[in-house]
């Protein structure tokens, strides 16, 4: 999941190269100073952008700007959520699914009528991607609607959503929330920097590559 990539990217960040100046941050997220060789390739470098340009400024109470570079990096990192979302597709209820964009920009792999909700900046990659002619036959199945996190319920109801799906961030019930198994501190910081609320519970549903929290009627639904 995305939290693991954030942790790997943190090792490749500019902040990590100045570890002493950012010791408080790395202690908070549980990443120690190491002298071993670091692998810094595509997704690690994308995660480093998110850490340096968004999470670190938020942590130190500076202006955390959701720049195009940060959004592009989140779009790249969200590929880590694709197998989990595809596995979740089989257990979602029938009807319209509201996919809330936050730490993960995802949901195109669902075979449901889908409404994508979230801040304008996070919806732009999806808007651009769905302009491809390949999506023309599916236009009736996809709706992209700007919504801040305080208006998710209202907008989802407007489109007749039967359930919400999110990644890390809490959303109103009925809800299915993909969770990180490790490095949730980084995921929580990213979620808060985006203006959303991290989900605090544990996963009740085990799927390949994922733990999923299930909320029904305002109560967590224990499947085991």
Image: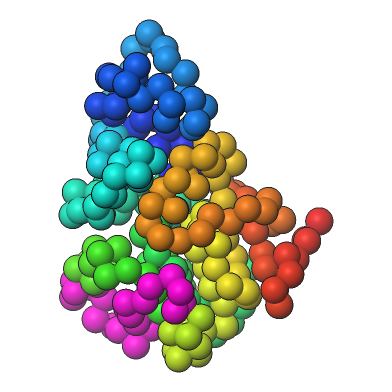
Quadrant of the drawing holding the C terminus: bottom right
Quadrant of the rendered image containing residue 136: bottom left
Colour theme: rainbow
Residue at (46, 40) in percent of width and height: 186
Q: Which residues are magenta?
A: 130-152
Above or below 194: residue 118: below
Residue at (38, 10) in percent of width and height: 36
Above or below 128: residue 10: above
- The percent coordinates of residue 79 (x first, y second) are 37, 50
Q: Between residues 36 and 15, which one lies in front from this camera angle? A: 15
Horizontal arrangement in the rendering, residue 173 relative to residue 103 (left or right): right
Residue 209: in magenta span: no
Magenta residues: mostly which secondary structure?
helix
Above or below 120: residue 64: above
- The percent coordinates of residue 49 (x first, y second) are 25, 39
Horizontal arrangement in the rendering, residue 197 relative to residue 12 (left or right): right
Residue 150: in magenta span: yes
Quadrant of the rendered image containing residue 35: top left
Residue at (71, 77) in percent of width and height: 217
- The percent coordinates of residue 213 (x first, y second) are 65, 59
Q: Is residue 96 visible?
A: no
Residue at (55, 45) in percent of width and height: 180
Q: Is residue 105 visible?
A: yes
């Amino acid at each position: 999941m995305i939290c693991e990539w954030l942790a790997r990217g943190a090792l490749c960040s500019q902040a990590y190269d100045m570890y002493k100046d950012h010791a408080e941050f790395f202690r908070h997220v549980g990443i120690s100073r190491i002298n071993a060789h670091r692998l810094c390739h595509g997704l690690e470098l994308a995660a480093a952008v998110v850490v340096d340009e968004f999470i670190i400024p938020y942590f130190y109470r500076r202006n955390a700007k959701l720049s195009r570079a940060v959004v592009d990096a989140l779009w790249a990192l969200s590929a880590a959520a694709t197998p989990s979302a595809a596995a979740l597709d089989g257990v979602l209820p029938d009807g319209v699914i509201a996919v809330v964009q936050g730490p993960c920009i995802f949901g195109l792999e669902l075979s449901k009528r889908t409404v994508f909700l979230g801040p304008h900046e996070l919806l732009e990659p999806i808007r651009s991607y769905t302009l491809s002619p390949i999506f023309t036959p599916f236009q009736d199945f996809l709706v992209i609607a700007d919504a801040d996190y305080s208006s998710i319920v209202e907008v989802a109801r407007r489109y007749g959503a039967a359930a919400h799906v999110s990644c890390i961030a809490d959303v109103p019930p009925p809800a299915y929330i993909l969770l990180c198994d490790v490095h949730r501190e980084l995921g929580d910081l990213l979620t808060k920097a985006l203006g959303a609320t991290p989900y605090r519970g544990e996963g009740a549903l085990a799927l390949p590559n994922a733990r999923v929290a299930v909320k029904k009627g305002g109560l967590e639904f224990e499947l085991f």
